[in-house]
Amino acid sequence: MSNELTAQDLEHFGGELRKILHRATGTTDQIEGESLDLGGGGLDTQGDAGADAEFEEVDLDSLGVEEAATEAAAAALKRISDGTYGRCTECSGWIPRGRLEVVPYAPLCVSCQEAAEEEA
Ligand SMILES: [Zn+2]
């Protein structure tokens, strides 16, 4: 079964990623519309103000985790613009959609993530 993401999926996950960045930086104005032009033209950066509540808070309490998530989210947005979003940066396999729903900035597929965690 293909896990390929549609343009609609990319828009959805792009929105989630921007929310993560907004949350982490606290500067919504600065990010929106700037430097995050994804080139798709159809992404509405203004329309998600009311949707924040539906995003489940990931546990970012640990020191450094929030920063890492912010960087990961920024990198993931770049992958959307590069057209590689949803692919494992390690093995280029598709990252399961369900995994992206939980961690939209996940750079690795499940098995590569597990391998990385074992190494750590
Ligand atoms: Zn992988």
Image (spheres, rainbow, N blue to C red):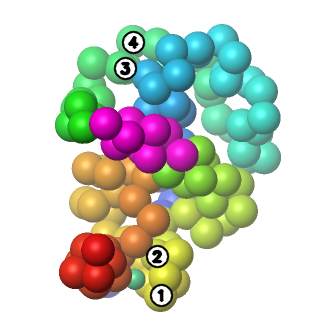
**Residue at which label 3 appears:** 51
The location of residue 80, given as percent across then percent down, is 62, 56
**Residue at which label 1 appears:** 91
**Residue at which label 2 appears:** 88
> Marks 1/2: CA distance?
6 Å
Q: Earlier in the sequence, mark 2 or mark 4?
A: 4
Q: Earlier in the sequence, mark 4 or mark 1?
A: 4
Determine if the C-beta at disc 2 is less than 8 A from ligand 1.
yes
Determine if the C-beta at disc 3 is less than 8 A from ligand 1.
no
Q: Earlier in the sequence, mark 3 or mark 1?
A: 3
Mark 1 surroundings: few (<14), some (14-19) or many (≥20) residues within 10 A: few
**Residue depicted at 44% across the width and 22% down the height:** 23
In the image, which is nearer the foreground, mark 2 or mark 4? 2
Left or right placement of residue 54 versus residue 50 in this view: left
Q: Circle 3 sits in a helix, a strand or a loop, which is it?
A: helix
**Residue depicted at 53% across the width and 22% down the height:** 25
**Residue depicted at 74% across the width and 24% down the height:** 33
**Residue at which label 4 appears:** 50
Left or right placement of residue 65 versus residue 48 in this view: left
